Image: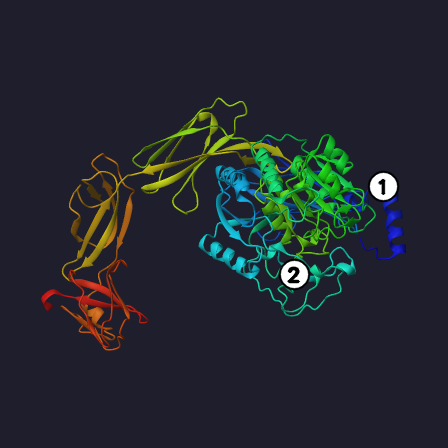
Amino acid sequence: MKLLYPLYVFCLIFLALSLRGQSFGEQRSIRLSAQEEPGGGVRLNWTAPPGNITGYSLRKKLAQQPTYGPAIATLTPLDTTFLDTQAQAGGLMDYVLLATGNTLNPSSMVRVSLEAVPEFPGRILAIIDSSLDFNLLQSPLDRWQSDLETEGWIVHRMYTQPGDSIPLIRQSIQALYQQFPDLSHLCLMGHVPVPYSGNIAPDGHNDHQGAWPADNYYAELFGTWTDQSVQNTSASSSRNHNVPGDGKFDQSVFPAQLDLALGRIDFEQMPAFGDRTALLIQYFEKNHRFRKGMVTLPEQGIIDDNFQSFNEGFSAPAWRGFDALFGPQSILEADFFATGQANGALWGYGCGAGTYSSAGGVGNSSGFASDSLAIVFNMLFGSYFGDWDNNNAFLRAPLASKGLGLTNIWSGRPYVYMHYMGAGETIGEAFRISANAPDFSYGNPSGLRGVHMALMGDPSLRLHHYSGMGPAQADISCDSLSVLWSVGMQNPPHSVQVAVRTGQGAYTDLGTFPYGGGQALALLPQPGQYQLLVRPLYSKETGSGTVFFPGEGWIDTIDVDFPSAQIDTVWQDMSGNCPYHLQWSAQGGTPPYSFVWTRATNQSDTTTSGLCPGTYFWQVTDAKGCVGKLDTLVLQLPVSIAEAEKNMGLWYPNPFEQRICNEALEIGQKLSLQDLQGRTLWEGRAEVKGGCIAPKDLAPGVYLLSAEGMAPQKVVFRSGME
């Protein structure tokens, strides 16, 4: 790392020693956690930061809100706990605790869950390098997709060639996002083309300034990226050179917020570890084992800080976040490699003077290749290896190792916060929130929102994963769904969540049910073929409250056939106070059908007449007694012929009997006739310029007639022109 001034560094070291040897990372941090209070509310607990402070300021917001409001409490230097009695069960809340009166600005954040039922995760797009050996990889890849689907993900795949256009890949992602707005995660598998961007050296080395790998170009969908202004070829490696028109972008920070959570699983140029396809297979195997709850590790975070005298406090995100993941006193200051090989941990942070394949005092890529470290989630920081697109890259080494490493992040410039995972978020979503820097004033501003920020690994992973609850049984009666399951598990879940989806649609949540009941009852919205998902929710006390983590679910296809009906035509005549006439049809279930109206008796006819303006409720019943959903129809006051004739426009004659004409029509112009409820009764195209149309089978009444490029006009059809 770049040392600014020797005297300045000496003073910092002296100050650090005077504070009982605590690193600047610890001095900048408040160790904050939260728990659900038995009587209601959120109890925040913390450890006072080293050094003198004058008090604390506490702020709060809902998780979905972008910014914090004013302080909800001002506390004394002696306070180490606070009860928020206003916290509502079932939601996610963010808190930030700031120490006052200390120039290092110690702070911490926590996202708190009070038994918040998790939403279904949406969609993940796997972008896969098509040059991989799929004879060997297809089965592990299919199992990975199945693992995600049983958790509630909808998985899409897209394949790329090594030389594919990077902007075109982004355009394909944009198109999928526009089609499915619930797309939330991207996973790059293999050596998917690597975007480069910027004129940066976030590690402080001039021989490394220029364009760095910028994977999140694919995750930022609506900002503008250019390739016309940066001119820098001073870096030692040509990879980092950036000149106009070379395909490397100018931007050093994200031009807009990241829309998607992105991670990369890529073992290109990792010869110390083995063949890239074999490494992917190995990664998918340990990913599968972790997802199925086969991995048991100490719930703690390891910190190995070899930059203790740097005022920036690179290790602060670990000091601030690990208690929020695991609860108070969950940090172990220890040697990264020695602890990883001995007892291991779910999380680890290490930093030290770096090269492309090492961090001083932490380890090197050769060590990851030969040793087996039991640390699943990693944050490593040091010079050079934040630029990960190189031979035996240290940032990708934990993933390539035969140990349990599944993710890694270069965290220090800027800080990357993972405390969101304590409340059940995926590591990808935690990274995305942190990269968008909503709380920039509480971190290290160096490198903030920099294009170099990257997550190595599967972005869909959560802090805790669990095995399934076994198969279930689904029974359908009309529109009623009954799901049964066995309750004889050794490690039972807290509850069971039931959802369905049709076709390419998203999941519809049908409810959460107590596991011990062994049964879920729900109504399905309409007939059709559904994919049913029954997934267990496991209750876990973390340092962020009472959190529900989904386990492996059960998926089945069910066919639902109950009757439904629709109104096909609404028309009105010009006589009396009740001029409306309706025609409808039914489908599904077992015919014949009968219909019930608010103001009518049970009838089998598919038409009714003489309806007055008002609100009507109606249902269809089939021969087996299955009842369709209750529909509502609102009929407005009728439109008179005199009113329609006030604005004849270009259509004539109006009223009309057989034909109606328009001198402004052009050949091929699209035409449409609708009833007053907006239902299309006739469509066609003008066959001649200035021609006429003759809709068939119209009942007398008022209609809307439109021509492409013209405003719709009310027209009146009267049989015989009476």
Percent x, y of residue 594: 19, 41
Task: Give me the residue at 49% from left, 48% from top.
Answer: 157
Percent x, y of residue 241: 70, 63
* Mark sitting on residue 535: none
| Quarter-of-image position of residue 656 | bottom left
| Quarter-of-image position of residue 73 | top right
| Residue designated by label 1 | 21
Is 660 placed above or below 88 here? below
Percent x, y of residue 491: 55, 25
Percent x, y of residue 154: 47, 44
* Mark sitting on residue 197: 2
Q: Is mark 2 on a helix, strand or loop?
A: strand
Q: How crowded is mark 2: few (under 14 residues within 10 Å), some or many (20 or more)?
A: many
Q: Is residue 205 left or right of residue 57?
A: right
Q: Is residue 639 visible?
A: yes
Task: Give me the residue at 54% from left, 30% from top.
Answer: 467
Q: What residue type is labelled 1?
A: Gly
Q: Is residue 524 left or right of residue 71?
A: left
Nearest the camera: 564 or 475?
Answer: 475
